[in-house]
Image: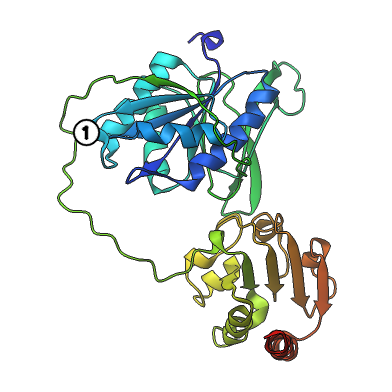
């Protein structure tokens, strides 16, 4: 493999039902930063689907300089084999140095298969991406390579952080958690170079047939889209005590979320978990109630605009990242806080 042949930062622009997924736009924002660090002029989005060319303008508005479109009826709905064939063919033809894929249900299925097919590595579920030297520290007898993609992800159940590189193979591939990277402000009217590419599709015994698609509305709130989150940890004490958080969230028009300890205790479902092994959130207001502030949790919410911590332990690490902190018993504080907010809202009406 000649590494010099591989140039540029590419992202897989996931779409479902001809609507771009938010992760595609988030990846474009990060790709722009990586391209600048590599002195690359273009960021490329790879768009797979059927009748999806019209999505190119939106990708351009969020940072794509070029959109490679593979448009074929075989790609109408996500299926592993045709999508793997399409994306692997794009890599073999255009030779990207870096390829980013969202760590969604689709991306987690697609990324490993594509990396295997093009004989490169993949770092899954990344929470941070940077360009730098690898190994991070010079090691006697080992060449330190420059301008490598440094991919950071939680390891061992979130108990440690690993930084991984792929210095000897290309492209450098990573799947990235939704909500971790930030979109750029859209550039209205921006246009991208559109390249139509189709490697051709021949069904084989790995093709599946979709008999029926059944869509079910989730009964769990989308915490990544919430502007206000009232998050509880082990210190809440019990599943029943979460009613105090429910009441506060209701008067604020917010959503309840939780820490990993709460999910492990069976008090709340996994979809509400914030942190490295949960979801990354960026609300305008984040209440951390009964949450100690372990690094695994903080990594999932530290970009919140305002953080308010309530904890009876004045030495809890959560106070180090909080904008406002209250030391005390949440069972006494929350009812009073909820009542005062209700009164203030009633007075404003």
Q: Quadrant of residue 159?
A: bottom right
| Residue 290 drawn at (x, y percent) | 70, 76
Can residue 86 be seen in this snapshot?
A: yes
194, 282: nearer the viewer: 194
Residue 284 spot, x, y in % from top left: 68, 62
For residue 265, side relative to residue 142 (left or right): left
Say if residue 124 shows up in the picture. no
Residue 176 vertical position relative to residue 251 in the rendered view, above or below:
above
Q: Is residue 111 above or below residue 290?
A: above
Question: Which of the image's four quarters has the C terminus?
Answer: bottom right
Residue at image mark 1: 73
Toward which corner of the image does residue 251 lie, by quadrant?
A: bottom right
Q: Please tell me which residue lies in front, 230 or 161.
A: 230
- Residue located at (54% from left, 35% from top): 61
**Relative to 116, 179 lies left or right:** right
When asked about the image quadrant of residue 29, the answer is top right
Element type at mark 1: helix
How many numbered circles does the render carry?
Answer: 1
- Whole-percent x, y for residue 46 in the image: 43, 29
Residue shown at the point (68%, 21%) measured from the top left: 147
| Colour convention | rainbow
Left or right of 214, for residue 26: right
- Compared with 157, 93 (above or below) is above
In the picture, measured across the screen, residue 136 lies left or right of residue 264, that is: right
Instruction: Return the x and y of residue 120 as percentages of the image width and height.
Output: 46, 24
């Amino acid at each position: 493999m000649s590494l010099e042949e591989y140039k540029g930062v590419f992202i897989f622009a996931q779409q479902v039902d001809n609507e771009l997924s938010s992760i595609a736009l988030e990846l474009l924002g990060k790709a722009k930063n990586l391209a600048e660090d590599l002195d690359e002029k273009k960021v490329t989005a790879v768009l797979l689907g059927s009748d999806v060319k019209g999505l190119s303008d939106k990708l351009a508005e969020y940072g794509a300089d070029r959109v490679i479109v593979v448009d074929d009826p075989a790609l109408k709905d996500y299926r592993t084999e045709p999508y793997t064939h399409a994306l692997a063919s794009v890599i073999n033809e255009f030779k990207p140095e870096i390829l980013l894929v969202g760590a969604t249900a689709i991306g987690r299925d697609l990324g490993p298969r594509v990396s295997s097919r093009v004989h490169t590595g993949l770092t899954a579920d990344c929470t941070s991406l940077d360009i730098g030297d690898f190994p991070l520290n010079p090691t006697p007898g080992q060449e330190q390579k420059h301008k490598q993609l440094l991919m950071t992800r939680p390891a061992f159940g979130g108990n440690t952080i690993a930084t991984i590189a792929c210095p000897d193979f290309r492209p450098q591939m990573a799947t990235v958690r939704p909500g971790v990277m930030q979109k750029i402000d859209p550039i209205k009217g921006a246009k991208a170079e559109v390249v139509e590419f189709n490697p051709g599709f021949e069904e084989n015994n790995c093709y599946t047939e979709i008999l029926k698609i059944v869509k079910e509305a989730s009964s769990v709130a989308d915490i990544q889209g919430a502007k206000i989150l009232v998050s509880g940890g082990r210190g809440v004490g019990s599943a029943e005590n979460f009613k105090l958080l429910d009441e506060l969230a209701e008067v604020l028009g917010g959503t309840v979320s939780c820490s990993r300890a709460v999910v492990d205790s069976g008090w709340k479902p996994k979809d509400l978990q914030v942190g490295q092994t949960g979801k990354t959130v960026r609300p305008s207001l984040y209440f951390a109630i009964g949450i100690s502030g372990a690094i695994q949790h903080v990594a999932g919410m530290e970009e919140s605009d305002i953080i308010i911590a309530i904890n009876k332990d004045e030495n809890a690490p959560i106070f180090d990242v909080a904008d406002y902190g209250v030391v005390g018993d949440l069972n006494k504080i929350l009812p009073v806080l909820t009542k005062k907010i209700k009164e203030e809202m009633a007075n404003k009406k």
